[in-house]
Amino acid sequence: MSPAPDLVAEAECLSRARAGDTAAFDQLVAPHRRQLHAHCYRMLGSPFDADDALQEALLAAWRGLAGFESRSALGTWLYRIATHVCLRMISQRPRRMTSPDHGAPLQATADLGEPVTGPVWLEPLPDAEWIGNHEDPATTLQGRESVALAFVAALQHLPGTQRAVLLLREVLEYSAAEAAEMLGTSVASVNSALQRAQKTVKERAPSADVQALEAQGIDSLLQRFVSAWESRDVAALASLLAEDARFTMPPLPAWFSGRRFAIMFFAERVFQTPWRLQPLRANGQPGFACYMRHAGAERFTPGGVVLLRLRGGLIESIDSFIDPAVCRRFGMPDELLIC
C-alpha cells in the first residue's frame, strides 16, 4: 500500500527543511501553528506570552529538526517542545492572575486604585487567533470550553507540570503514556498530577454555560446589553445581571461583586461618559470593543475590551480589559468618529 499523499508531502517538506529550506519548514509547521499558540496561551494565560513561547518553540524545532526521527507525529514533537518552553517560562515569571486573586471586591467607587502594571494579569485571546477558517462546529464547541476565560484562569493556579498534564491529557487527548514520554516522567506521575489538577480546576472553574451561548435568546440578550450600556440605562442593565454578577477591569485592581455593587459602579463611574460598543468574540465568549467619549471630545477612543460569561440567561460576569495593548490586539482603531 502506498503512503498517504499528505504523508508523502510532509516527508518531502521535512527533507527540504532539514537541508536548510526555511520556506519548507514554514510549510511544515503551518498546519500546527494556530493550535500550538492556543496551547501556549492556556499554559501561560496571555496571548503575548504565547507569542514569545511559540516563537521560541519554533526556533528550537528548526534548530533541532535533524534530531526529529519521525517516531512520533510531527505535531506531537512540536507540542513537546512548546510545552517545555512554557514550563521554563512558568518557572521564571509570576503567574497570571484575575482581580479576585489580587484582593477583595470594593463596595465604593471613589477610589479604584492605581493600575497594577507588568505581565501579571490574565488576558483574553481573540477567537480569530484560535479558530481556523474551516473549523468543524463540533471541534469549535469543544475548543471553546478549553479556552474559556474561567478555565484558563483556573489553570494558572496549577503548578506548571500539573497544568501541562491536564492540557495534554484532557484538551489534546494524549494517552498517559504519551504525556509521560513528552514530559520525561512516568505514567504513575502523570496520573497523579492529573487527579490533583482536575480537583483544583473543578473547584475554581464554573461549568461552561454552552447551552446559553447557543440558545436563540443570546442575540436578544446581547442587543439589550448594548442598548442599556449605550443609553446609560441603569435599570435595564440591572435586569440583565445575575444576583452574584461581578465586574472586573484589569490592570486596575478594583472589582465589584454582586449586582448591587456592579450597578453602583456603572451608575457612578461608567455611565458618566457616552459609549459605543462593537461586537467581538474572545475565549469562545461574546464580548464588545468599548469606545468612550470624554467631555468636549469629538471622537470616541478605546476604553477597553469586555467579555461576558452567561448563566441561566443572565450575565454572570463582565470582565473588562482596559490595557491599551489588549485593545490593539483586537484591532481596535485609535478613534471612532461620532455618527
Image (cartoon, helix red, strand yellow):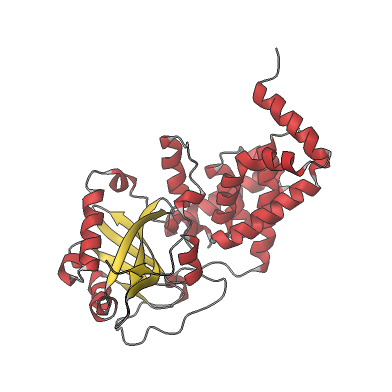
Total marks shown come to 0
- Is residue 304 shown left or right of residue 295? right
Q: Quadrant of residue 137?
A: top left
Q: Nearest the camera: 224 or 77?
A: 224
Q: Nearest the camera: 62 or 274?
A: 274
- Depicted 160 relative to depicted 137: above or below: below
Which image quarter holds the N terminus? top right
Q: Position of residue 336 (x, y in %)?
A: 36, 67
Q: Nearest the camera: 325 or 242?
A: 325
Q: Which residue lies furthest to the bottom in this view?
A: 110
Q: Position of residue 177 (x, y in %)?
A: 66, 38
Give the residue displayed 55% in from the left and 59% down from the top: 47
- Depicted 256 relative to depicted 277: above or below: below
Give the residue displayed 69% in from the left and 26% down from the top: 7
- Is residue 262 shown left or right of residue 74? left
Which image quarter holds the C terminus? bottom left
- Depicted 131 relative to depicted 280: above or below: above
Q: Where is residue 117 in the image (x, y as percent from the top left)?
A: 53, 78
Q: Position of residue 189 (x, y in %)?
A: 66, 48
Q: Is residue 112 visible?
A: yes
- Is residue 38 shown left or right of residue 74? left
- Is residue 228 shown left or right of residue 282? left
Q: Quadrant of residue 136?
A: top left
Give the residue displayed 65% in from the left and 60% down from the top: 52
Q: Which residue lies furthest to the left in this view?
A: 235
Q: Is residue 158 visible?
A: no
